[in-house]
Image (spheres, rainbow, N blue to C red):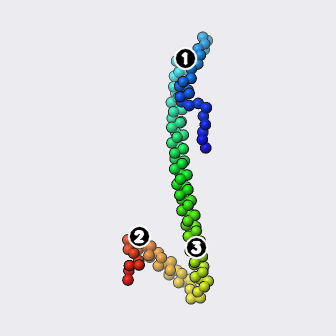
């Protein structure tokens, strides 16, 4: 995704044109090229900044993709455990599974509050 330009601000600044009598006014050409150089400098800085942002976003995207993959694996493991529980135990009903979910949510709330549910007796 590199933008390769033939001109750089330095090449424009260093460019000299041979003078011819029925030609352009060298001062006007110089003034115009100064404007072009300023634009090139701004564009080069912009490209550098955008490339840095793109690299940071790619790193962040990679991190979140890895997290998503890990969560999907954990979800699959938990779904497998849940299906094994409901298939293997005749005493397990949907209400028991709902109770387990509620207990899990309550434990999470305790952890967020700074209380270890295992220490409660």
Q: Mark 3 near mark 2, Cβ–Cβ under 8 Å?
A: no
Q: Mark 3 near mark 1, Cβ–Cβ under 8 Å?
A: no
Q: Distance between the residues labelled 1 and 2?
A: 73 Å
Quarter of the image where the N terminus is located: top right
Give the secondary structure at mark 2. helix
Quarter of the image where the C terminus is located: bottom left
Count of numbered circles in the view: 3
1 or 2: tag closer to the N-terminus: 1
Using the rendered view, name the quadrant where residue 82 is placed.
Answer: bottom right
3 or 1: tag closer to the N-terminus: 1
What residue is pinned by disc 3? 77
- Whole-percent x and y of residue 38? 51, 30
Q: In this view, does 82 lie above or below 60?
A: below
What residue is pinned by disc 2? 112
Give the secondary structure at mark 1. helix
- Whole-percent x and y of residue 46? 52, 39
Q: Distance between the residues labelled 3 and 1?
A: 75 Å
- Residue at x 60%, y 79% (from the top left corner): 83
Q: How crowded is mark 1: few (under 14 residues within 10 Å), some or many (20 or more)?
A: few
- Whole-percent x and y of residue 57? 53, 51
Q: How crowded is mark 3: few (under 14 residues within 10 Å), some or many (20 or more)?
A: few
Q: Which mark is residue 26?
A: 1
């Amino acid at each position: 995704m590199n933008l390769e330009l033939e001109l750089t601000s330095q090449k424009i600044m260093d460019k000299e044109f041979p003078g011819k009598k029925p030609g352009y006014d060298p001062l006007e050409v110089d003034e115009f090229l100064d404007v072009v150089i300023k634009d090139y400098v701004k564009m080069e800085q912009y490209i550098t900044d955008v490339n840095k942002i793109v690299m940071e976003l790619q790193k962040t995207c990679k991190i979140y993709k890895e997290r998503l993959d890990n969560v999907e694996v954990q979800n699959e493991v938990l779904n497998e455990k849940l299906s094994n529980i409901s298939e293997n135990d005749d005493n397990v009903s949907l209400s028991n599974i709902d109770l387990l979910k509620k207990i899990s949510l309550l434990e999470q709330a305790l952890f967020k509050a700074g209380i270890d549910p295992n220490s409660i007796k």
